[in-house]
Amino acid sequence: MIDVQFDDPKYYINRELSWLAFNERVLDEARDAANPLLERLKFIGITSSNLDEFFIVRVAGLKKQEVAGSRERDTKAGLTASEQLTAISERAHCLIEQLDAVLHGDLLPELKSEGISFLTPKEMDAEQLAFIEAYYQIQIRSRLKLTIVDSHRSFEMLRNGSVSLAALWQDAGHAEPQVGIVHISSTLPRSIQLPSASEHRQFVLLENIIMYCGNTLFQEGELQEIMPFRVTRSVDLVLDVENSEDLMRVMQQQLEQKKLGTPVRLEVTRKMSGTLRDKLRTLLGLGSMDVYNTEGPLDLSFYIELAGLPGYDDLRHAELIPQDPVWLKRDPSIFATIAREDLLVHHPYESFDPVLRFIWEAAEDQDVLAIKQTLYRVSGDSPIVHALEKAAYNGKKVTVLVELKARFDEENNVGWAKALEQAGCKVIYGLPDLKVHSKITLVVRREGKETRRYVHLGTGNYNDATAKLYTDLGMFTGREEFGEDAESLFDHLCGEVDLPPWQRVVTAPHGMRRKIIDLIKNEIKHVKMGYPSRIIAKMNSLTDKEIIKALYKASCAGVRIDLIIRGICCLRPGIPGVSEHISVISIVGRFLEHSRIYYFRNGGDERIYLASADWMTRNMQRRIEIMFPLLQDNLKQRIKIILAIMWADSVKARALHSDGTYTKVESADEGAFESQLYFYNE
């Protein structure tokens, strides 16, 4: 066998470009005429929202490196920060053009034909013009603020990602036109329904009302131009703390400061003059490649909400109602059911109710002594949090680790942490240098003269809202070894014990990567001995170089490897002599594929794990994660069926090629097969 240099950058796809390829697949769902119209519109909003997060986090991080003068190359594809930013800009500008083409070329005309349209003042009748003028005076005028732009600091009041208006006007006191910013209150709705003589639903965007009526803001001069714009800022939180007791205080300080993050992107409409655009760009300290021109409107995430417009059910997917698993009502107590056998739930096809019942029953059961749980992201009015509060009121010992550093949920989690403390729970704010991303709940219950531990482990968050939208798996078990591992984990998180030896679970950053690589090496050993070998792994993203190198080595040894990766994949499949035995598909559908499943053939003695962790460097090194084995044969069989069904998808699956492109998976037979619909119908 030829000696392969597995570190060669040509064998890796750049992480950021792979993410942009993922967002292109999201946009494909908006293109797909087989999807109902309002579902396609929702994917326009999701594509836009995804892109915001990408700039806020990833592009901001690269810009920080560039400003610092870093010439360091990324460890996989070998690109400097500047090279990555150039490639990102080219790809992202292309994505915006595609997004505009889908929205204005297809979706908005189709919406209009269905009786839903957005009007500009030029398209309104007299009644509608009178309506927006009155609406402006009553609802909007007093909630606007005009700032004269004289320096970069003039933009600090702008909320990250908010749509604002830039004005160019001439007054007698200045030789050059002045630039002003009209700040719009976040309490105002983005779209307003207009009165209409027909049955059609007609709307106007907030910024269009202000542009039409906003002359009153510039009474001392001549308004030459007023146009919408949008600034994206970095939101990097610098948490310089030595212990968890300081974490809450520092986090609250940082949340106030993050509103003033460094600008990384300027969005404008193509109608804005070059003069005004260049003035904004210069004042913000951005380069020309950081300016994104679009047909508009700006910030398309409002289409996500519009997609739920009442009265148009025929333009949406039929609602899929999560079903209760058959075992949920088997016994009066869920603990009796779990004591009998390990149980698996598959969200959103099966409801989140078993998880809620597990926590609520524990809160109200007089025999339950303690509840311990990790919380990473929860819903806005979380029944999980309310159950934990109830448990504390009922005298249970309740310990909750609330991860304050969960990106974009920091403020929510600070609020929940305070509420849980006020209810009498012991709250751990996370660890200073690691995010606690594990999904685990432990219930300690008195049964006769003994105590028994019950555990729930999952791949997804304790969030009843996203459990209806994300595919995830969870396991309930009463096995003592899992209970002891759970108890040890919480003792470790509380700082009461050093890292204990685990009986069943595998954790990061304390050995998960090593365990995964050992499992891959084990498949190499088996294939060389002529025993059955295979790896099937499903995850959100694959970026960890050491794991990718291990997969390449396994492929070279002849191990068949099938990967189902929704998002980022830095591995290049199908390279002769390197990854020719590796296949990769991505499934983007109505539900967000979020579960993590890892299957190893192991010579016939199959090993199957579920995990909170993707095979990403951040999960292996900078987060507390849990990977746990399935021990029960019926649960193993169910997971094998889930993986086989997903691999057979010929509707939503896209295959990754060695050049980094994705194409639609071709069906092996006549019929189209969609895995997510199959799971629901099953």
Image: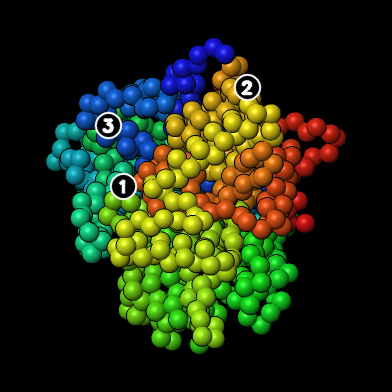
Please tell me the numbered disc located at residue 235.
Answer: 1
Q: Amino acid at mark 3?
A: Gln
> Between disc 2 and disc 3, whose residue precedes?
3
* Residue 589 drawn at (x, y percent): 64, 46
In space, the residues marked 2 and 3 are separated at their CA atoms by 35 Å
Q: Amino acid at mark 2?
A: Glu
Which one is in front, 267 or 429? 429
Residue at left 29%, top 25%? 72
User: Viewer-nearest of labels 3 and 1?
Assistant: 3
- The answer to the question of whether label 2 and label 3 lie on touching residues, with beta carbons closer than 8 A, is no
Which one is in front, 487 or 72? 487
- In the picture as drawn, the residue positioned furthest to the front comes out as 529
* Residue 514 drawn at (x, y percent): 45, 40
The quarter of the displayed image where residue 537 is located: top right
Q: Amino acid at mark 1?
A: Val
Please tell me the numbered disc located at residue 580.
Answer: 2
Residue at left 50%, top 79%? 451
> In the structure shown, which secondary structural element does the residue marked by tag 2 occupy?
loop
- In the picture as drawn, the residue positioned furthest to the right comes out as 670
> Does residue 672 lie above or below 352 as drawn?
above
> In the structure shown, which secondary structural element does the residue marked by tag 1 occupy?
loop
> Does residue 307 lie above or below 281 as drawn?
below
Is residue 344 shown left or right of residue 463? Answer: right
Q: Which residue is mark 3?
A: 65
In space, the residues marked 2 and 1 are separated at their CA atoms by 40 Å
User: Viewer-nearest of labels 2 and 3?
Assistant: 2
In space, the residues marked 3 and 1 are separated at their CA atoms by 15 Å
> In the structure shown, which secondary structural element does the residue marked by tag 3 occupy?
helix
In the picture, the quarter occupied by the C terminus is: bottom right
In the picture, the quarter occupied by the N terminus is: top right
> Does residue 140 lie above or below 302 as drawn?
below
